[in-house]
């Protein structure tokens, strides 16, 4: 079964730790089933059986299947958001911040490929909305990432580290969109499309470009 990594606090009671463990087990079982068969073809009863709980246990944590799915997606979004912010904050140099961002995003995609395939397979080009404001919640997290990237470009331009070839927000969207395109192609065709393991390759496309320098 897929493992959902815990975030524990030593001050939490034993009973509360057990509740959190049960919730993680339910989410892990749901991820396994949703990834294998799609959201629409999995029931709460099947998730309960996979997690080895009575179905009533699931309803102690989630109102319905839509709520369970939403929690699964939002936990992934929060994990992405926290990891990317931490990666960008750890470096001092602006180029290193971008390098950390690219490397971490690639690692997060590889570690969570099953859930990412599920979410984008269900939502791209369709009207699938198990929770009406789910996409808005995800977009709010992505907006924070774009603003952070833009601030890195803005700071680099101000210090003369980068040329002011475009507004910082444009540069942030360009880098993020380019990385997403590469990672989505890898998800769909991993056997023929290389994984994004070298962040400098992506930075070279943006910073050096394809045109040869004038002699």
Image (cartoon, rainbow, N blue to C red):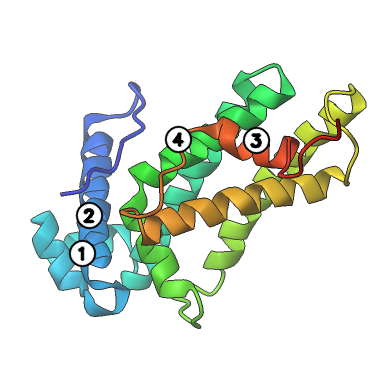
Q: Which mark is residue 203?
A: 3
Residue pushed farthest front? 215
Closer-to-camera residue (143/161): 161
- Closest to the camera, between mark 1 and mark 3, is 3
Q: Which mark is residue 113?
A: none
Counting from the top left corner in percent of width and height, residue 6 is at: 31, 35
Q: Which mark is residue 197?
A: 4
Q: Residue at x 62, y 51 (%)?
A: 178
Sooner in the amino-acid sequence: mark 1 or mark 3: 1
Is 124 placed above or below 185 here? Answer: below
Closer-to-camera residue (98/119): 98
- Give how far apart the Cα atoms at labels 2 and 1 are: 11 Å
- Give how far apart the Cα atoms at labels 4 and 2 are: 32 Å
Is 203 placed above or below 45 here? Answer: above
Counting from the top left corner in percent of width and height, residue 192 is at: 35, 55
Is 97 placed above or below 195 here? Answer: above
The residue identified by callout 2 is: 26
- Closest to the camera, between mark 4 and mark 2, is 4
Is residue 17 left or right of 192 when viewed as pictured? left
Q: Secondary structure at mark 3?
A: helix
Q: Is residue 64 visible?
A: no
The residue identified by callout 1 is: 33
Is residue 190 left or right of 136 when viewed as pictured? left
- Give how far apart the Cα atoms at labels 1 and 4 are: 29 Å
- Give how far apart the Cα atoms at labels 4 and 3 are: 12 Å
Is residue 55 left or right of 190 when viewed as pictured? left
Residue pushed farthest top? 92
């Amino acid at each position: 079964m897929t493992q959902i990594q815990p975030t524990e606090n030593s001050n939490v009671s034993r009973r509360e730790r057990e509740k959190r463990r049960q919730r993680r087990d339910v989410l892990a079982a749901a991820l396994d089933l949703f990834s294998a068969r799609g959201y629409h073809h999995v029931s709460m009863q099947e998730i309960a059986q996979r997690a080895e709980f009575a179905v009533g246990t699931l309803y102690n944590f989630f109102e319905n299947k839509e709520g369970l799915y939403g929690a699964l997606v939002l936990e992934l979004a929060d994990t992405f958001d926290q990891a990317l912010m931490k990666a960008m904050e750890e470096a001092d140099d602006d180029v290193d911040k971008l390098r950390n961002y690219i490397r971490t995003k690639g690692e997060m995609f590889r570690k969570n490929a099953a859930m990412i395939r599920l979410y984008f397979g269900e939502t791209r080009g369709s009207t699938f909305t198990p929770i009406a404001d789910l996409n808005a919640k995800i977009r709010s997290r992505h907006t924070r990432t774009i603003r952070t990237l833009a601030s890195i470009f803005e700071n680099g331009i101000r210090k003369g580290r980068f040329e002011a070839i475009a507004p910082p927000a444009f540069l942030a969207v360009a880098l993020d969109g380019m990385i997403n395109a590469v990672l989505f192609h890898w998800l769909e065709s991993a056997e023929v499309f290389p994984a994004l393991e070298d962040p400098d390759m992506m930075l070279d496309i943006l910073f050096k470009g394809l045109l040869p320098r004038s002699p």
